[in-house]
């Protein structure tokens, strides 16, 4: 291997060129990331499980059988969010109820990448069952933001976002139910994309809210985002909601936005955007016009109702989906129960964390007799209004832009006792999921030394348009994605307590959390 590869700056496009040109082997490339994990993981806590032995062996096999294992992704190391099942590797959803769950099959999106000979480095941390906006709801550990380890990486795909930002993975898969790819991408200073609902199969993604969940990429560049996306999209016979895209995902080129009309919704800018975030957003909007685009003000009048509608619909679907975790078929089972009902109650009481229990209770109430129409039915009608707002807006604009998150990364522990404040983190991202649209976040600068995200939203199946526009903006912005790894609260007992899952008092008798690092 000539020279030293910098995992904090290396992009998949460059890594593949090095592999093709013979300047680095797959084993050497994998070792770069395993060494980085060994160097920083004790501080970042991005991974629930590191599959170091498997990664090393498989990358060596790729080098040995390179004629049979050629392809645009062969040999490129990847991290996978731990709510996508992986045969042979424990999948936990960062929950005690699945602490030892060994899947017998692999999620379609992951299987497609395995078939393309990607090297899996391990499974990343998340908010339990993807329910959260900070990755503080994990039963395993609290992940730190590589820009400032005393702050959160966002959520629920915070482990995947932090791993990419910290140079522990070349790129990663996450899932997005209400912003869980885009928001952590924004807070960690990387690129994150939620595709059109149905563009990527959800088969093997452990369900949170089935009408909202979507798998997508977290990467260091828009080009890498397109490269990873094009390998995971498509119709899947195992997922009835999946669709065949009417186009091939294109690898973006160009540095201009000539002829593009971009809408700026006033309602989003009235959502309590921090001054520093607003300043970076305004600068990026000005850059859109410098590149030849035209920016116009638009209205999405039902934006303010998106958050309350989401927090009825998502918990209702979660209540139904999580009913399967009962201690009968798989996962944790409480010991010493005298009858079936007690076994159910104790299993779920011991296995689920506080946020999951909260959402199950809300969802069950919303679906109960006498309240279904008043809550769930009304929320679905609001969802229709949100969709219509976007449809009308896209009659006059090509794309819509907004800040990805109203704030930069906040301190760990600062919102854990205030669920509503935590929910407000997703104000700018939730409407996209309600409407099933594609959107992506790119870093557009810093505020108080922390990354700011710029969100681009398109109509259904406009992934190529989004990627091309984001690529042009990314080039003009020239954002440096290497984090600082500072710790503004390194000596704070309060910060240490906030980071410690043990300090958040797991229930007595609960099963052990999965290991933070292991080989499988």
Image (cartoon, grey):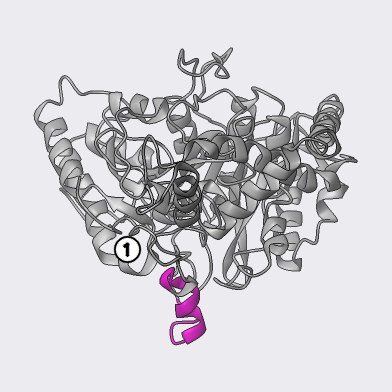
Name the residue: 29% across, 29% down.
104
The residue closer to the viewer here, 17 or 485, is: 485
Instruction: Give the percent coordinates (x, y) of residue 331.
Output: 37, 43
Q: Is residue 132 visible?
A: no
Quarter of the C terminus within the rendering: top left
Q: Which residue is mark 1?
A: 41
The residue closer to the viewer here, 409 or 365, is: 365
Tell me where residue 146 sits by quadrant.
bottom left
Q: Is residue 147 visible?
A: yes
Instruction: Give the percent coordinates (x, y) of residue 219.
Output: 46, 44
The residue closer to the viewer here, 508 or 295, is: 508
Position above or below: 272 against 178: below
Instruction: Give the percent coordinates (x, y) of residue 20.
Output: 23, 31
Residue situated furthest left in the rendering: 64
Number of marks in the rendered image: 1
Is residue 490 part of the magenta span, yes or no? yes
Is residue 325 part of the magenta span, yes or no? no
Stretch of the chain drawn in magenta: 487-502
Position above or below: 312 against 453: above
Element marked by disc 1:
helix
Say few, some or many: other residues with alpha carbon within 10 Å of mark 1 (under 14 / 14 to 19 / 20 or more).
Answer: many
Name the residue: 87% across, 41% down.
302
Name the residue: 60% across, 27% down.
463
Name the residue: 61% across, 40% down.
319
**Image position of 57 (left or right of 426):** left
Instruction: Give the percent coordinates (x, y) of residue 511.
Output: 35, 57
**Image position of 373 (left or right of 38):** right
């Amino acid at each position: 291997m000539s020279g030293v590869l910098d995992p904090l700056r290396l992009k998949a496009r460059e890594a593949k060129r090095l592999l093709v040109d013979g300047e680095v082997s797959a084993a050497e490339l994998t070792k770069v990331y395993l060494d980085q994990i060994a160097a920083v993981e004790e501080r970042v806590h991005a991974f629930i499980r590191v599959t170091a032995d498997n990664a090393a062996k498989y990358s060596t096999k790729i080098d040995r059988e390179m004629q049979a294992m050629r392809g645009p992704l062969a040999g490129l190391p990847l991290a996978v969010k731990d709510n996508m099942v992986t045969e042979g590797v424990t999948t936990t959803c960062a929950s005690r109820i699945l602490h030892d769950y060994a899947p017998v099959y692999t999620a379609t999106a992951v299987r497609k990448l395995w078939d393309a000979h990607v090297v899996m480095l391990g499974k990343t941390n998340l908010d339990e069952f993807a329910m959260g906006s900070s990755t503080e709801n994990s039963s395993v550990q609290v992940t730190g933001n590589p820009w400032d380890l005393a702050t959160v990486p966002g959520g629920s795909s915070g482990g995947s976002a932090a791993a990419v930002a910290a140079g522990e993975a070349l790129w990663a898969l996450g899932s997005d139910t209400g912003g869980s790819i885009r928001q952590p991408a924004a807070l960690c200073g990387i690129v994150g994309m939620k595709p059109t609902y149905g563009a990527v199969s959800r088969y093997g993604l452990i369900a949170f809210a089935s009408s909202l969940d979507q798998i997508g990429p977290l990467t260091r560049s828009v080009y890498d985002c397109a490269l990873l996306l094009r390998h995971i999209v498509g119709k899947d016979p195992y997922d009835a909601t999946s669709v065949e895209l009417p186009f091939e995902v294109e690898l973006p080129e160009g540095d201009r936005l000539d002829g593009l009309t971009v809408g700026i919704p006033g309602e989003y800018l009235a959502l309590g955007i921090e001054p520093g975030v607003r300043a970076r957003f305004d600068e990026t909007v000005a850059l859109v016009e410098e590149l030849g685009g035209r920016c116009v003000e638009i209205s999405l009048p039902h934006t303010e109702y998106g958050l309350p509608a989401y927090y009825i619909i998502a918990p209702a679907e979660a209540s139904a989906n999580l009913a399967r975790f009962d201690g009968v078929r798989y996962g944790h089972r409480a010991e010493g129960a005298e009858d079936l009902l007690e076994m159910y109650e104790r299993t779920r009481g011991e296995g689920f964390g506080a946020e999951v229990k909260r959402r199950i209770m809300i969802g069950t109430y919303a679906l109960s007799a006498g309240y279904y129409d008043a809550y769930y039915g009304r929320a679905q009608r609001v969802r229709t209004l949100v969709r219509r707002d976007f449809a009308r807006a896209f009659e006059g604009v090509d794309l819509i832009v907004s800040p990805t998150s109203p704030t930069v990364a906040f301190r760990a522990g600062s919102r854990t006792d205030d669920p509503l404040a935590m929910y407000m983190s997703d104000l700018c991202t939730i409407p996209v999921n309600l409407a099933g649209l594609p959107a992506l976040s790119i870093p557009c600068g810093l505020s108080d030394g922390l990354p700011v995200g710029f969100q681009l939203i398109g109509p259904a199946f406009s992934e190529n348009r989004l990627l091309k526009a984001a690529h042009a903006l990314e080039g003009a912005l020239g954002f440096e994605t290497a984090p600082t790894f500072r710790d503004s609260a390194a000596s704070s007992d309060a910060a240490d307590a906030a980071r410690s899952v043990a300090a958040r008092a797991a229930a007595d008798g609960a099963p052990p959390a999965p290991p933070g690092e292991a080989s499988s």
